[in-house]
């Protein structure tokens, strides 16, 4: 089981989260949704840095120093509380503690993790020695990742992709600037990393040699964008269904916000990127509810794609996102209970979009507290959160009607 515990950071006194394959965090702005998933990203990044550390034959102290510096980049000092704080990441027997004491950041490893790292270093060193004796090139991040998968945990070998909010920013910026920023700028590291990867992914999006295997995925994309993305002479366009070709910077805010997310999902779905953990902030931004629903359909199809394995994190303000995921869970639940009705269910929710019970978590965060939204009996998202906002609006409207009549 994968967990994160946050103590005294970002307005959170103490919260514990358990994560599964698909994870949804909902709540008002500024309550800690993004911070929580960024902590997850940070700790998972540790194991990618571990691979580099082993290849370069650096010490554990070097690894800790690099991670301390990275923490300050991800979470600048001006965002820290005055007192101490503690963040704990655990995955089964693996545990990493990050603590601020007397103004300094310290890392602590569980004994299991220490032992596993020693085994990986020994195994990799032996492989390097054997390969060198044969005159072969030895250094390989992929091989160390495989050893991490074997000796620590499969999840920890996954790549990471963080898709931030504010994606319309990318519609108005020079394509190569992110590679420059990545090399020399102190700007938001999540934004810069995303921008550089986005430029890579745009180059392969719907390339003729690797064009889609499943037209229905592309059809959902076309419905969301109300057109199709075209890259021509290093410029980005949307070709509308009425054949108008519009430069991306002149399209709607919803199209600008959604296109980068769509490009990422397309590249992942069609198998051009290996196993990954994907973090998506505000997939609903500037979208009408039916398009929000379509985004959840794409995410479910991606997750159910058998070629690669994915873990998904979503932060959202939208109850439509929750409701849409709930429908996919219900379809999966009924299909398991009544396999004889699979065809009938698939006419409502495509079988590639049905989600199995028990693989999704959903949390509501507000005022430093969290609520687990999954009903333990049904494994569905509870109706309380889904209906609460609508009920408040309806009650307010009822009061106005009482005054009128």
Image (cartoon, rainbow, N blue to C red):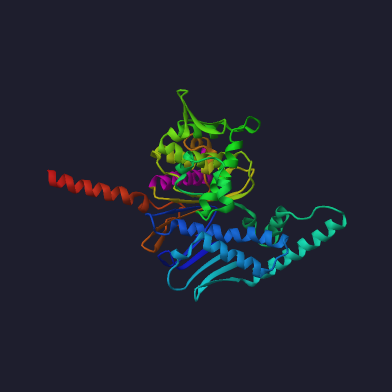
> Which residue occupies the foreground of this view, 229 or 274?
229
Numbered range of the magenta stretch: 319-341
| The stretch drawn in magenta includes residue 314 | no
> Which residue occupies the foreground of this view, 290 or 120?
120
Judge from the rendering whether residue 254 lies leftward or rightward of residue 65; answer left or right.
left
- Estimate the x, y position of residue 161 in percent, counting from the top left: 56, 50
Q: Quadrant of the C terminus?
A: top left
| The stretch drawn in magenta includes residue 334 | yes
- All told, the count of numbered labels is 0
Q: Is residue 300 visible?
A: yes
User: Which residue appears farthest toward the top when viewing the image?
Assistant: 242
- Estimate the x, y position of residue 123 in percent, counting from the top left: 77, 63
- Estimate the x, y position of residue 229 in percent, counting from the top left: 52, 32
Q: Is residue 99 above or below residue 374?
A: below
Tell me what residue is drawn at x 54 percent, y 56 percent: 20
User: Which residue appears farthest toward the right when viewing the image?
Assistant: 134
Q: Quadrant of the N terminus?
A: bottom right
Q: Can you tell which quarter of the image residue 364 is in?
A: bottom left
Magenta stretch, main secondary structure class: helix
Q: Is residue 53 above or below residue 203?
A: below
Q: Is residue 311 visible?
A: no
Judge from the rendering whether residue 11 lies leftward or rightward of residue 211; answer left or right.
left
Q: Is residue 234 above or below residue 363?
A: above
- Estimate the x, y position of residue 50 in percent, counting from the top left: 66, 61
> Which residue occupies the foreground of this view, 325 or 113?
113
> Which residue occupies the foreground of this view, 182 or 243?
182
């Amino acid at each position: 089981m994968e967990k994160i515990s946050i103590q005294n950071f970002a307005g959170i006194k103490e919260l514990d989260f358990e994560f599964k394959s698909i994870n949804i965090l909902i709540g008002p702005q500024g309550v800690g949704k993004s911070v929580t998933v960024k902590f997850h990203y940070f700790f998972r990044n540790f194991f990618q840095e571990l691979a580099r550390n082993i290849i370069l034959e650096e010490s554990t102290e070097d690894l800790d120093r690099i991670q301390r510096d990275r923490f300050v980049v991800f979470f600048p000092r001006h965002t820290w509380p005055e007192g101490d704080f503690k963040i704990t990441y655990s995955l089964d027997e693996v545990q990493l503690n990050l603590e601020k004491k007397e103004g300094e950041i310290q890392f602590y490893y569980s004994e299991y993790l220490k032992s596993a790292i020693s085994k990986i270093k020994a195994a990799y060193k032996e492989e390097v020695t054997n390969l060198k004796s044969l005159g072969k090139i030895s250094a390989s991040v992929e091989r160390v990742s495989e050893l991490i998968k074997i000796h620590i945990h499969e999840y920890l070998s996954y790549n990471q992709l963080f898709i931030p909010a504010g994606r319309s920013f990318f519609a108005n910026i020079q394509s190569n600037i992110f590679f420059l920023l990545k090399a020399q700028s102190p700007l938001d590291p999540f934004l810069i990393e995303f921008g550089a990867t986005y430029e890579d992914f745009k180059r392969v999006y719907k390339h003729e040699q690797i064009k889609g295997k499943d037209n229905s995925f592309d059809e959902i994309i076309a419905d969301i964008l109300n057109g199709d993305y075209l890259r021509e002479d290093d410029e980005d366009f949307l070709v509308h269904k009425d054949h108008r070709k519009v430069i991306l910077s002149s399209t709607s805010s919803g199209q600008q916000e959604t296109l980068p997310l769509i490009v990422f999902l397309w590249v992942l779905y069609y198998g051009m990127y290996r196993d990954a953990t994907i973090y998506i902030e505000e997939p609903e931004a500037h979208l009408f509810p039916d398009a929000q629903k379509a985004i959840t359909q794409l995410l479910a199809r991606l997750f159910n794609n058998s070629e690669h394995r994915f873990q998904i994190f979503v932060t959202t303000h939208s109850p439509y996102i929750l409701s849409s995921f709930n429908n996919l869970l219900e379809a999966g639940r009924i299909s398991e209970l009544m396999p004889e009705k699979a065809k009938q269910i698939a006419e409502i929710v495509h079988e590639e979009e049905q989600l199995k019970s028990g693989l999704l978590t959903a949390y509501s965060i507000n005022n430093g507290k969290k609520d687990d939204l999954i009903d333990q009996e049904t494994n569905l998202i509870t109706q309380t959160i889904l209906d609460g906002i609508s009920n408040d609006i309806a009650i307010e409207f009822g009061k106005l009607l009482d005054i009128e009549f």
